[in-house]
Amino acid sequence: MRKTVRRKEHRAPIGFIILPMIDVIFLLLLFFVIMTSFEASAKVRVDVPKPEQSQAKREASPKQVVINCEVADRAPAGGGSAVYRVAANPPETLDAIAARLMAAKQANPQLKVVIRADRRLPYADVRAVMQVVSDVGISMMSVAALQEDER
Amino acid sequence: MSDGSQGSAVEFLRSPLGARGDGPVLPHRRRRRHSAPGIHLNIIPLVDVTFLLMIFFVIAGTFERWEGVLSSRMLPSGPSAGVPLPFTPVTMRIRGTGPNPSDFLVEIDGAGRATRSFTELSVMLKELQRNPGFSADTPIIVVSDSGVRWDHVVSAWNSAIRAGYRSVAFGGNE
């Protein structure tokens, strides 16, 4: 009889502690909000090059146009193996991109172009975009690559 | 005799006089400690949360590298193409050596040898700077075969920047 009483005294209270869960949920929410804002500029998923000891720098400028070059699932009508799109817009031909760049350059002569090309593409497909950029008269161009892992 | 004295002390504590605080100090304190609500730091949920967060961040944050940009400038085309450069540029040629896009070889004009390793390429470019007439301001022009993978072209370009060159530009197709 006495032993039974002691067991009852030492038994931990059974309860659902909700506060840590709320803490975790808020922290996760915060984390995802921050991560989403960082990734906002790269809505189109492109497997960009990963050079050894990358010298790529983080550089976000509001006056830049991002041209994405992806590997096409099917061979495009114009030849080559790439699909081109400006930012997250639908795929376009290089002529349409040239017209778009021309209009953007007239609005902003200091326009900068970032080429986000898939690492598997042949150079000729990326070179075609560079030629368009050069023909429009834009000299400031960057290419996207992964930065060196700092951890 | 001792039993009798203890019994009387307990009797005293249980009496209304002892409970009001008029009795001896020590037993009164002991009694208050037992009756006060338990104020303590419950550290176990904190440890749980910390471990959960650690696991989450290890899984979610380890395998991604941030995306950055390598800045370049396009070589002038058209009427301005004939503007003389202050330094004689060095051309870095990336040649496809087989049907596979991963088959390539990088040559540097004037270096006299070719390589497939981008680390070695960076060393070669650094050595080139020691030659008379060359420096970190010497423009590097990257020229590649059409079929070479973009990854290799960017890696070659990255090697030039690693070697300390300040002006790296894309030329054209070989």
Image (spheres, rainbow, N blue to C red):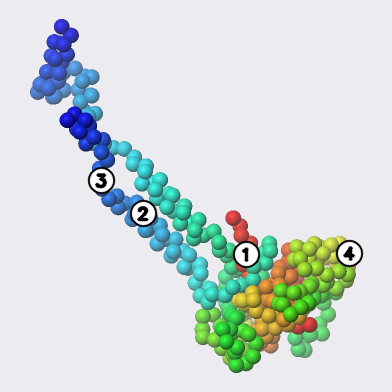
Compute the Cα span from label 3 to label 1.
Answer: 49 Å
Compute the Cα span from label 3 to label 4.
Answer: 78 Å
Compute the Cα span from label 2 to label 3.
Answer: 21 Å
Q: Which chain does the residue under circle 1 lie in?
A: A
Compute the Cα span from label 1 to label 2.
Answer: 32 Å
**Residue position for label 4:** B131
Circle 4: residue type: Asn
A37 lies left or right of A102: left
Instruction: Mark 3 vs mark 4: give the one in front.
Output: 3
Is label 3 in a helix, a strand or a loop?
A: loop
Circle 1: residue type: Gln
Residue at the image point whose x is 78% and y is 82% from the top: B174
Circle 3: residue type: Ile
Circle 2: residue type: Asp
**Residue position for label 3:** A14
Residue at the image point whose x is 65% and y is 79% from the top: A121
Which of the 4 quarters of the picture holds residue A48?
Answer: bottom right
Q: Nearer the viewer, residue B60 or B159?
A: B60
Is label 4 in a helix, a strand or a loop?
A: loop
Residue A10 appears at what percent x and percent y? 26, 35
Residues tagged 1 and 2 counted as in contact (Cβ below 8 A) = no
The residue carrying pointer 4 sits among few (fewer than 14), some (14 to 19) or many (20 or more) residues within 10 Å by Cα, namely few
Which residue is situated farthest in the top direction here? B1
Please determine if labels 4 and 1 lie on a single subunit: no
Q: Which chain does the residue under circle 4 lie in?
A: B
Quarter of the image with the C terminus of chain A in it: bottom right
Residues tagged 2 and 3 counted as in contact (Cβ below 8 A) = no
Is label 1 in a helix, a strand or a loop?
A: loop
**Residue position for label 2:** A23
Quarter of the image with the N terminus of chain A in it: top left
**Residue position for label 1:** A147
